[in-house]
Image (cartoon, rainbow, N blue to C red):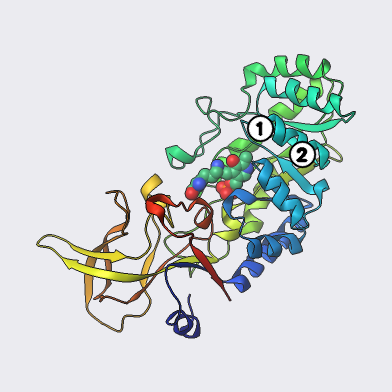
Amino acid sequence: MLSKDTIARFGNLETPFYYYDLGLLDQTLETCRSAAEKFGFHVHYALKANFNEQVLQAVRKTGFGADCVSGNEVKKAIELGFDPGKVVFAGVGKSDKEIIEALNSDIYCFNVESVQELGIINGLAAERGKTARVAIRINPNVDAHTHQYITTGLEENKFGVNQWELNSCIKELKACPNLKLIGIHFHIGSQITNLEVFKSLCVKVNELNSWFEDHGYQLQILNVGGGLGVDYHAPDENSINDFESYFSIFDQFLERRNDQEVHFELGRALVAQCGSLISRILYVKNGLKKNFLILDAGMTELMRPALYQAYHKIENISSLSDVQVKYDVVGPICESTDCFGKEVELPESIRGDLMAIRTAGAYGEVMSSGYNLRERVKSVYS
Ligand SMILES: Cc1ncc(COP(=O)(O)O)c(C=O)c1O
Ligand SMILES: N[C@@H](CCCC[NH3+])C(=O)O
């Protein structure tokens, strides 16, 4: 909940901007850290969810590692003080330049997404007299029951290698003396709210763990990715995930060998609820059939509703009116999908009112764009 003092402070600020509640972020990180510690699990924060420096500093202080998906994310994590020994690098299209930089930084592990990539990393490592630690990202063909655009673990998705390619992976690994296979990696999708899905993932991981054992590989790491969803409808009631219940599923259903480590790559569940996009109403348009609130923020600042029809709770945080009106809440961008919500019930609103679009800390600021030559969105913290 945004406090009265915080809202009063916004009154003097130019909008739009992202507001981050760093206190809530710290509490969320600490809840996750202590739950993971209880089970002896390791967490790498997925930078793609939010690489705002203040957010990253808080994550780094917690002691989490970094899960990166580009050379620049690897560079940023290391520059901000993450231990290279806790940096992992995934991505279906790692360029040679990105691989070389990651090798030079001695990162912990490459999460490899194709048979061909194994050979490329091996060649680049050999040229530098290095051995690269790798984990194979396997597509487990588990349905994450999430939005079709953010599911990643089905055979029709571009991510990872399919199970029928595993023999080729082993053959390639045998021909790659500069690679050390340390684990297997999975990530089945994002915004997963049905925790049963993770049980199905565990069953697959167990099967594949045994498969590698049967082929002579004792894996050090089982990396089960991220994907834990958050409550977009009730950000105040459920501001921090129940990380203990989430981790306990893996504790119960994963068949770990003696020293095997379990790694997680959480993004959204760590940072979504601490961020809100704050905006002002520019115009109120009352039509015959619809009332529009036109905000000074749009899909350029928060793309999720336009891209995935994603729901975000919208609040008028300055209106004192008791009258409730339904509005379509839209942005100023020259696109019809530039809409944050349709038929949203809000207190009667006027030009200048402050609006908060909640649960915007993950995949918000980082996905903003300069379309329509918009200014880069600013951030405010408390
Ligand atoms: C490989 C990988 N790991 C981790 C994540 C983080 O996912 P989430 O933010 O849903 O926890 C993603 C994004 O979906 C991903 O693609
Ligand atoms: N960017 C997405 C999720 C994809 C996560 C990365 N694989 C979102 O806003 O929900």
Residue extending furthest toward the right: 129
**Left or right of residue 254, residue 374 in this image:** left
* Residue under the image location 67 percent in, 47 percent down: 73
Work out whether residue 358 or residue 302 is closer to the camera in this orientation and state it. Answer: 302
**Under tag 1, what secondary structure?**
loop
Q: Which mark, residue 207?
A: none
In percent of width and height, residue 326 lies at: 22, 66
* Mark closer to the chain start, 2 or 1: 1
Residue 66 versus residue 108 in the image, above or below: below
Q: On the image, numbered disc 1 is attached to which residue?
A: 94
Q: Is residue 302 above or below residue 178?
A: below
Which residue lies at the image location 21% right of the left edge and 71% below the top edge? Answer: 325
Q: Residue at x 54, y 35 (%)?
A: 152
Q: Circles 2 and 1: CB distance less than 8 Å?
A: yes
Instruction: Determine if the C-beta at disc 2 is less than 8 A from ligand 1.
Output: no
Residue 6 coordinates in the image, percent (x, y): 50, 81
Q: Residue furthest left?
A: 288
Residue at mark 2:
102
Residue type at tag 2: Ala
**What is the distance, in whole Å, between disc 2 and disc 1 at their CAs?**
10 Å
**Quarter residue 166 falls in:** top right
The one of 338 and 266 positioned closer to us in this rendering: 338
